[in-house]
Amino acid sequence: MIICYRGKMRVRLLPLALAKIINHSLSQPKVEVAGLLIGREENGVVEVWDAATGEQVGTPGFVILNEEVMVKVVEFLQEHKIPLFIVGWYHSHPSLGLFLSPIDIKTQLTYQSLYPNAIALVIDPSRYEESKKVTNSLYKIFRVNQQGEPIELPVTLGAGTRKLLESTLIGLTTTALFQREIHDTAMSKPFKAISNVFRQSLGIEGGRKNE
Ligand SMILES: [Zn+2]
């Protein structure tokens, strides 16, 4: 049942979602931040309407988002009868460039196993910090093909006025799903264990790095 738009899959990014992602990445410009992309699919186009985030651990070279954030987002959307779902994830690469690392590819494959057309947005906030301009070098959207290689997807930024208004209204409703603070200390024990494994495998010391 995998829907595959070979080389044809497109993404529509609504400004509100991108603004939230830019804002989030600028709030922690020296460490990686991550969150979820909320949207829907229309005529084979994955539309990103909104973004959400929550508990995570970030360093200058990696970030891990607590899986509970995903549960929280799904519950919130159902509770508020918002006809959108999680279409992927985003994370920042501060001054690192726009690509998927081997760990990012693994993470993306997990998202693609949950939703076959899941996408990964990577943003480098340093590209915005100085210029205050939203250029094509600020962000890129990828997915992983059957060979396990990341492929960049074409992105359209914007939509018709009605859709912009609808996404803005939803974005106002979901502000509760956008806590920028990194609550490292509030993490559950299993999550801490997972993040320690990540840290060790990446050669990152155990100290908290939330600068
Ligand atoms: Zn990455």
Image (spheres, helix red, strand yellow):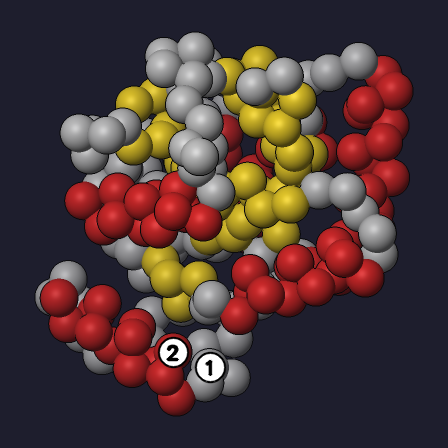
In the shown orientation, is residue 102 left or right of residue 191?
Answer: left
Residue 13 vs 161, above or below: the answer is below
Tag 2 near tag 1, CB within 8 Å: yes
User: Circle 2: is it few (<14), some (14-19), or many (20+) Cα within 10 Å?
Assistant: some
Please name the amino acid that badge 1 sits on.
Met
Residue at x-position 55% and y-position 40%: 87
9, 91: nearer the viewer: 9
Residue 154 vs 15, above or below: the answer is above
Residue at x-position 45% and y-position 85%: 188
| Residue pointed to by mark 1 | 187
Location of the C terminus (image quadrant): bottom left
Splitting the image into 4 quarters, where does residue 102 fall?
top left
Q: Nearer the viewer, mark 2 or mark 1?
A: 2
Determine if residue 15 is in view.
yes
Horizontal and vertical percent position of residue 147? 17, 29
In the picture as drawn, the residue positioned furthest to the bottom comes out as 189
Residue at x-position 13% and y-position 66%: 201
Residue 207 vs 123, above or below: the answer is below
Please name the amino acid that badge 2 sits on.
Phe
Residue at disc 1, secondary structure = loop
Q: CA distance from mark 2 to mark 1?
A: 6 Å
In the shown orientation, is residue 137 left or right of residue 27?
Answer: left
Location of the N terminus (image quadrant): top left
129, 118: nearer the viewer: 118
Splitting the image into 4 quarters, where does residue 73 fall?
bottom right
Residue at x-position 44% and y-position 62%: 65
| Residue pointed to by mark 2 | 191
Horizontal and vertical percent position of residue 71? 59, 65
Residue at disc 2, secondary structure = helix
Horizontal and vertical percent position of residue 63? 35, 58
In the shown orientation, is residue 211 left or right of residue 73?
Answer: left
